[in-house]
Amino acid sequence: MPSQPDPRPEEETVRYEVADDIAWVYFNRPDKRNCMSPRLNRRMKQVLEELEFRDDVKVLVLTGEGTAWTAGMDLLEYFRMNEDKGLGAVRQSQRESYGWFERLRWYEKPTIAMVNGWCFGGGYGPLFGCDIAIAAEEAQFGLSEINWGILPGGGASKVAQELMPFRKAMYHAMMGENLTGRQAEEQGLITEAVPAERLKDRVLEICEALKKKDGHALRATKWVMRRIVDMTYDNALEYQIRTQEALHSFGGKEARKEATKQFLDEKSYKPGLGTFDTSKLQDG
Ligand code: ACO
């Protein structure tokens, strides 16, 4: 029988829970391999915005229900049905999806992609949007666009070109062959691959380490890392100076004073070996 539109209401296309200062956000269309429909894209943007400034969210993890992280854009609801409605509908759904990918790239909190399974095409947008990407070794990554007659758009080819060695990215885009989690790690697409049964524990370890760090310094760090990609050395240097100064408006001076006191005077930690105790700050 031909595929039908998903009857699931918009609110259910994304599920989330917050526990121990970690927001776990799930692509939640497992029977459609979590492919991204316009409804999912709208809901995801709302959920990300709802969570972004909550004091009980220090790290956000984006993962998928079932066997997929996300099977990319929804070929039925995002492509065929929108194209039937005309250019306005196409543009609107592009803006909705690119909108939340962008929100994620510049998210206030550190973000981790916990890639539990399939990750295709349009999924590379949120994959890149997350600061750290940990995948199951068994996960599969593919720019499958070429297999159904389009080019990897929606940022996907840029993500491959930016993260992977050029020869590997070109092969990946042209051949439509999948990479395992392990190969994705070797080619720079993700941070690390681990056996599926270790995936959640590894992500939790990273979350716990991030939670201990100063949140303002983390935000400034991740934004600088992204912003300087296409700057000259001198511009990047200047930008880092200005960002560090701007950080002082958000507790940066106090954090630095406290951290240096703990190292130089109290000798309670070594910055080379760990993080200072941020619980001693008013605004940690
Ligand atoms: N768009 C629309 N529907 C999809 C998508 C998608 N991207 N991916 C899966 N589905 C649907 C299937 O049509 C099927 O729906 P139905 O039960 O209503 O017929 C359901 O999800 C389950 O899919 P299966 O193919 O049966 O699942 P299986 O586990 O065997 O295979 C796989 C998983 C490999 C992910 C396969 O579904 C697939 O190839 N999906 C398309 C991947 C892809 O190329 N995505 C587009 C990338 S390009 C871009 O994002 C712009």
Image: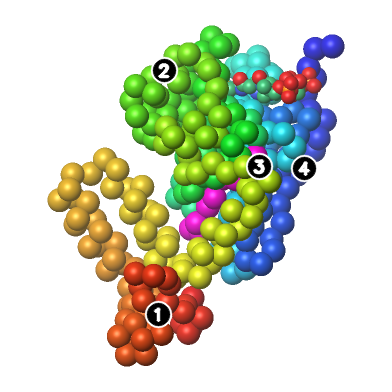
Q: Quadrant of residue 87?
A: top right
Q: Do the residues labelled 1 and 2 touch (CB within 8 Å)?
A: no
Alpha carbons under labels 2 and 3: distance apart: 27 Å
Circle 3 Cα neighbour tier, 10 Å, few/some/many (<14 / 14–19 / ≥20): some
The residue that disc 3 covers is 196
Q: Which residue: 42% across, 62% down?
A: 218
Under circle 1, the secondary element is loop
Above or below residue 266? Residue 231 is: above
Position of residue 126 measured from the top left corner of the image (x, y, whole percent): 53, 39
Alpha carbons under labels 1 and 2: distance apart: 47 Å
Mark 3 or mark 1: name the one nearer the start of the chain: 3
Image quadrant occupied by the N terminus = top right
Mark 1, ligand 1, within 8 Å: the answer is: no
Circle 1 Cα neighbour tier, 10 Å, few/some/many (<14 / 14–19 / ≥20): some
Alpha carbons under labels 3 and 1: distance apart: 34 Å
Circle 2 Cα neighbour tier, 10 Å, few/some/many (<14 / 14–19 / ≥20): few
- At label 4, the amino acid type is Glu
Query: In the image shown, does 94 or 209 lie closer to the viewer?
Result: 209
Q: Nearer the viewer, mark 4 or mark 2?
A: 2
Quadrant containing ligand 1 reads top right
Under circle 3, the secondary element is helix
Which stretch is magenta? 108-116
Q: Which residue: 59% across, 29% down?
A: 140
Residue 52's mark?
none
Q: Would residue 103 be found to the left or right of residue 167 on screen?
A: right
- At label 3, the amino acid type is Ala
